[in-house]
Amino acid sequence: MTAGRDGTEVLIVGGGVMGASAAFWLRGAAAAPEVTVIERDPTYAQAATALSVASVRSQFSNPVNVKISRFGIDFIRDFAAHVGPAGGVPSLGLRENGYLFLAGTAAGAALLEDLAAMQRSLGAATEVLSRAALSARFPWMRLDDVEAGSIGRRDEGWFDNMGLLHGLRNAARARGARFVTGEVAALTAEGRRVTGLRLADGTRMEAGQVLLAAGTRVTGLLATLGEEWPVEPRKRTVFVVDAPEARHPDAPLVIDHTGIYARPEHGQWISATVPEADGPCGLDDFAPDHQLWEDAVWPRLYNRAEGFAAAKVIRFWVGHYDYNRLDQNAILGPHPHFDNLFLASGFSGHGLQQAPAVGRGLAEIMLTGAWQTLDLSELGVARVLAGRPFLEKAIV
Ligand SMILES: Cc1cc2nc3c(=O)[nH]c(=O)nc-3n(C[C@H](O)[C@H](O)[C@H](O)COP(=O)(O)OP(=O)(O)OC[C@H]3O[C@@H](n4cnc5c(N)ncnc54)[C@H](O)[C@@H]3O)c2cc1C
């Protein structure tokens, strides 16, 4: 690895959870490179990391995603042990209530059975419950339209997103990573080599390797190299709901086949849906889709539990998925057109839980040229360039 003129061997664009995790793992390596993380907004006002629903599950349709989350849950559960006291975050407050995926048809129930078997073979604790079993366990739910549901008996729930970010960032800093504020405006390249970056204020930086962990803004950065990229911002409005007749603090995160998800949060609920006309939005468009509450979310909550008859939105927020329109899966690792360019992109709404394993994997491939502890090659860039989807079915 060649250091740039400023002595930095690795430049990471984006200091969200992916950039911070990669910096943490890179600096933990035996022959750790110099690492500089460049973040345009250290308040993280628009970063998906800060606007996340911050949940972790084993229930994915691709084994590689299950494996990524298996590592993620251990890391999240024993966070302080993994990052050490320098992280400054004693616990991520994991609530292990599980995810409950509901199926409304026999075919859907059969799919849940198949996926649960695959997930269990990888160490997950997914079980499929019939409608009767669900009803016994969650007597407050209306289940007439439900055939079955799959739930993780352990290893699934939610946690403190900003704790994960800050802990990783603090620990990366303590290991010697440098975090600087600046907006990368363009990348420059000569042949197969990215020669450096230009910041919006005109500063130029050179580096041995460049990792793009810039969330929704990655597509614009790759365009400066003449590269197309299938990642776009997709708006998600999240409602925080008070429903006094539906207080079920032990409820799981329900992925309802009618098209919403909901989970308890400090005596209230968090709920959201995918808009029917889903498509890209502006990078700075954080205006909420208020209408989704009345049109889509509330009726479906009420359909699932009568207690939602009296429900009030007390807060809402808007975040952007960095949506990979090819296959809704992460795009990771080396860019085949360049020798020193790497990606952590396209997480499509499930990246927070993936950050521990993805950061570790990226550090490995950047330092050794190969995936080591976990083979992430199915999530590599080649499939994107070839237009060959590697679809994840369990997208929320
Ligand atoms: C509403 C919502 C709910 C979600 N729920 C979950 C969930 O339950 N579980 C889960 O695992 N995941 C969830 N996610 C997804 C998860 O939050 C993201 O996948 C993850 O946080 C992505 O991290 P990141 O570091 O790649 O991106 P970001 O957090 O967006 O960070 C990218 C950073 O790059 C910076 N940047 C961008 N461009 C530049 C530039 N040119 N120069 C310098 N800096 C730049 C940005 O300012 C930003 O801080 C959710 C996301 C949303 C929006």
Image (cartoon, grey):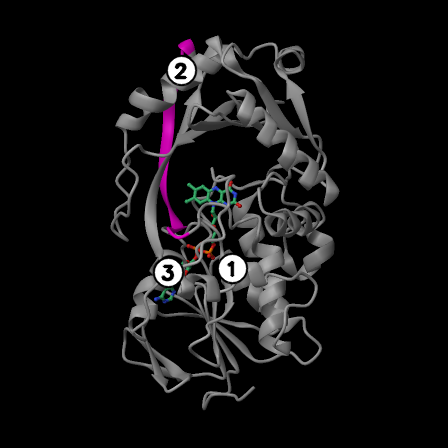
Q: Does the beta carbon at disc 2 come under 8 Å from ligand 1?
A: no
Residue behind mark 3: 41
Q: Secondary structure at mark 1?
A: helix
Camera-nearest residue between 359 and 80: 359
The residue under the point 62% across, 52% down is 64
- Whether residue 344 is in magenta: the answer is no
The residue under the point 71% across, 30% down is 153
Q: Upstream in the sequence, badge 1 or badge 3?
A: 1
Q: Which span is picked out in magenta?
A: 309-326
Q: Which mark is residue 122?
A: none
**Front of the two marks 1 and 3:** 1
Q: Residue 61: x percent and y percent?
A: 57, 42
Q: Does the beta carbon at disc 1 come under 8 Å from ligand 1?
A: yes
Camera-nearest residue between 354 and 199: 354
Given contact means CB atoms under 8 Å apart, are the residues at marks 2 and 3 in contact?
no
Q: Quadrant of residue 302?
A: top left
- Whether residue 320 is in magenta: the answer is yes
Residue behind mark 2: 311
Q: Residue 128: x percent and y percent?
A: 66, 25
**Front of the two marks 2 and 3:** 2
Is any atom of residue 284 visible in this view? yes
Q: Does the beta carbon at disc 3 come under 8 Å from ligand 1?
A: yes
Q: Upstream in the sequence, badge 2 or badge 3?
A: 3
Q: Residue 159: x percent and y percent?
A: 59, 40
Camera-nearest residue between 21 and 244: 21
**What amino acid is labelled 3 in the image?**
Asp
